[in-house]
Amino acid sequence: MSQVRDQGSVLLLALLLTLLIVAIGVAVLWLSRADFQRSVPRESPRAALFAVEAGIERARTVLAASDEWSVLLGGPRQGGCGARSLREGDDPAGRGNVLCDPRRPGVRLWRVPVIEQQRGGGKARARLSYTVHVRNDPLEASLERAGPFRDGDRRLVLLIEAIADRGARPTAVEVVVSAPPLPAPFRSYRQQGLNAAGNNAWRR
């Protein structure tokens, strides 16, 4: 009889010990998951700022290669670079149309993936993306002779939106970019007469 009682108490003790180990495991998993969730929001904005910086550099390259910035602005019912209609992401009345590359037809800076190299030499993956919107600067856009879709002072506003993870809120940075005006065509004088009394005429 005492042997049966000893076996029952050993079984009960083993069961309690198993429950304790399971409870400790569940608690450790729950705490590690909570730590991971807290660390993701800290990393996402930082990674999004890297994507914003990549968008700014790409936009600077496009603007430096373009002589006519009005082409990039598009119109109230058309996208930039001669597009006949608005495309996904274009917002001429608000953020501006999506910046396009006039040298490469059809290439727009819309949800451009940013490749991120994994630590330890793992596979590269694109979990970052950016979009670049362009619009005329407010001062020139308010003038009748210029308007929101005609750039004359080589000054534009870029809005770069970057998303670090799916479902994360976008990080947006707005910058004003400007460039020196294009040089006027060179003009010089030439003498048309045989002596100093001759006419002066413009020569390009």
Image (cartoon, helix red, strand yellow):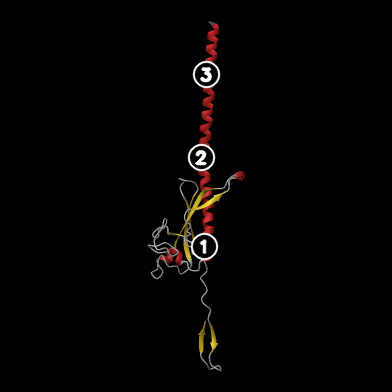
Give the labeled residue for mark 3.
15
Of pointers 2 and 3, the one earlier in the residue sequence: 3
Considering only order in the chain, which callout, 2 or 1, is on the residue closer to the N terminus?
2
For marks 1 and 3 on the same chain, the one whose residue lies earlier in the sequence: 3
The answer to whether mark 1 and mark 3 are in CB contact below 8 A is no
Mark 1 belongs to which amino acid? Val
Residue to which mark 1 is pinned = 62
Looking at the rendered structure, the kind of residue marked 2 is: Arg
Which residue occupies the foreground of this view, 9 or 38?
Answer: 9
Kindly check if marks 1 and 2 are in contact, taking CB atoms under 8 A apart as contact: no
Using residue 204 as the reference point, say whether residue 86 is left or right of it: left
User: Amino acid under label 3?
Assistant: Leu
Quadrant of residue 61 in the image? Answer: bottom right
x and y percentages locating residue 146 in the rendered image: 41, 69
The x and y percentages for residue 135 are: 44, 62
Q: Is residue 164 above or below residue 102?
A: above
Kindly report which numbered mark, 1 or 2, lies closer to the viewer in this rendering. Answer: 1
Q: Secondary structure at mark 2?
A: helix
